[in-house]
Image (tube, rainbow, N blue to C red):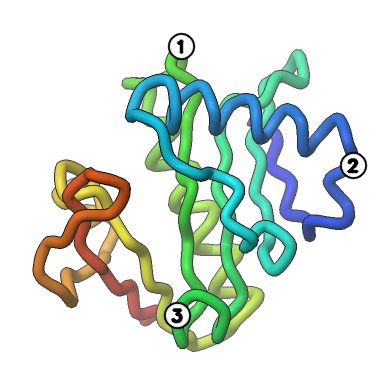
Amino acid sequence: MHWTWTRFEALGVQGLYEILALRCRVFILEQGAYLDPDGLDGQSWHLQGRDAAGTLQAYLRAVDPGIKYAEPSIGRVITAPEVRGTGLGRCLMREGMARCAAQWPQRAVRISAQARLRRFYLGLGFEPVSDEYLEDQIPHLEMLWRPS
């Protein structure tokens, strides 16, 4: 997997289109309608994982601290349906956490995790810091990762 970490302005029209298309496939077609373009993409870093053919297979964004939360936050974590179950999601998150640690040294990272993925995020070192709440009609909880 080839990883790129770029700001919004550097994505280019084609790159942005591919990201939005993948996010739409999963977040809207699989999980139900909600407003995906939420105004935070322009204040974020974008991590893309592309296979040898250049196809976007994994993506997340890291929102700058002070925008969504006091801490930097990871969100819009996604793998293409055809590569699920391969461990790519775990690789994506580890890569994203490493990029956040390099970008914002010694800063905790906050996520709004789907409650059904609690165990996945616990396995990556995130700790729950809230009760469950509904976000876009899906149970979520805030979780925090503190660098060691």
**Residue at disc 1, secondary structure:** helix
Q: On the image, numbered disc 1 is attached to which residue?
A: 82
**Percent x, y of residue 22:** 58, 26
Vertical position of residue 123 compared to residue 88: above or below: below
Circles 1 and 3: CB distance less than 8 Å? Answer: no
Q: Earlier in the sequence, mark 1 or mark 3?
A: 3
Residue type beneath disc 2: Gly
Res. 69 mark: 3
State the separation of the CA atoms marked 2 and 3.
Answer: 27 Å
Which quadrant of the structure image shows residue 17? top right
Res. 12 mark: 2
**Percent x, y of residue 82:** 46, 11
Residue type beneath disc 1: Glu
Q: Which of marks 2 and 3 is nearer the N terminus?
A: 2
Q: How busy is the neighbourhood of tag 1: few (under 14 within 10 Å), some, or many (20 plus)? A: few
For discs 1 and 3, the disc positioned in front in the rendered view: 3
